[in-house]
Amino acid sequence: MSIETLVENPAIPAESTPGMSSPFSPEEFDDCVMATYGRFPLALERGEGCLVWDTQGREYLDFVAGIATCTLGHAHPALVETVTRQIQTLHHVSNLYYIPVQGELAKWLIEHSCAERVFFCNSGAEANEGAIKLARKYAHTVLGIKEPVILTAHASFHGRTLATITATGQPKYQKNFDPLMPGFEYVPYNDIQALEDAIAQLDAGERRVAAILLEPLQGEGGVLPGDVEYFQQIRKLCDEKGILLILDEVQVGMGRTGKFWGYENLGIEPDIFTSAKGLGGGIPIGATMCKKFCDVFQPGDHASTFGGNPFACAAALCVCQTLEQENILENVQQRGEQLREGLRAIASLYPEQIAEVRGWGLINGMELKADTQLTSADIVKASIAEGLLLVPAGPKVVRFVPPLIVTSEEVDKALQAIQKAMLAVMK
């Protein structure tokens, strides 16, 4: 289940939880804001680096980072300077005009990826929506497919719009929102035979496969990395059949895996891929990127009022340049190894409860065994009591996605907190 619905019954009552005594009470908040999230009883008000503080002044080590979003942590000096300067000059104009910093950001992304064209929007769902539209237009205008189908994976997550929840291969996100968008079918992740069978079955009828949309590593689906051989076979299959390969890099892109892009871990290049979350380091921005051959959009086909505005693009360009200039990818690789090694040591102490530790770079998951009564929410709640913020990736996987600037000392501190949390939940 998602983080939004997971925490419906916090283990600690709000009135006894540090951080909830604020001028604006939880009751007032809930009276004003739609209940689309099950919120932990915690009110955060400021942050610095990998630390955040609640309204009571209690300090927490943030291994959520806005769910893999705060790439440079909180209040990073370079980002603070950039957004301050930009808001003082020009923060928004229409895309009816040329926006120089948008062009600079697009050029950086192209120079550091396989992309040749970029469209900017505001979120991962919008970026994936743009990719879906691009694939459908390509199917109609280039491939001559009247009823194009996009294959996606079970346990995937691609966003909350009607098209992207349909693309998401998890029925729980789709419940009560039908009729859903036509044109999607689902296959098991990391199963090439199932994919080949689905293509053959569809191509024998009126509908044809136009694109395959996958995450290089499934985030909400349990921090499940893609198999290298699986993705390389898909790339070959797409080349042979003229199918577009779309990769959803919303959670794993922008250095999160220890490389700029998740697909670099798989030894392939997509035709279209998307980014958001970490791209702006916490400032809302998304991007749909593609190779030239499938860039079939023309004026009027797609747009975004706020997409690519000067403020968001300046922030994203700052994030990109800081990742490169401060050699942060090396830190991601080293801290990721340190974190996984420490988590595996903890897992060895609880063989009846912990099944596996897996991940790339600084997106890692600790999976609980299916037959244990423990849930990821149990461990997340216990970790909050130890001053560590974590996020579930389903009912049995605890996700670790700290800012990419996390230090060795902070990883050690997080591991100590997890040890204490495990002791607490095992009592």
Image (tube, helix red, strand yellow):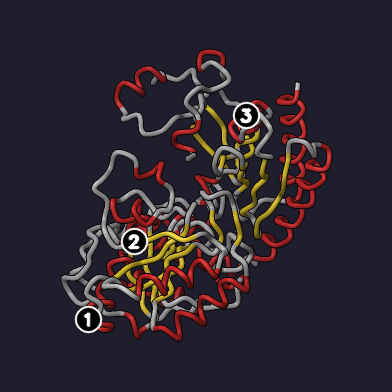
The residue at the point 40 percent across, 53 percent down is: 168
The residue labelled by disc 2 is 184
Residue 293, given in percent of the width and then of the height, sits at 35, 85
Q: Is residue 319 left or right of residue 385?
A: left
**Circle 1 — which element?**
helix
For label 2, the SS is strand
Q: Quadrant of residue 83 in the image? A: bottom left
1 or 3: mark nearer the eye: 1
Within 10 Å of the Cα at label 1, are there few (<14), some (14-19), or many (20+) other Cα atoms? few
Q: What residue type is labelled 3?
A: Asp
Distance from the alpha carbon under mark 2 to that under mark 1 = 19 Å
| Residue at the spot 74% in from the left edge and 31% down from the top edge | 422
Can residue 134 be seen here? The reply is no
Which residue was labeled with disc 1? 141
Direction from residue 244 to residue 305 in the image, left or right: left
Tell me the number on the disc at residue 378.
3
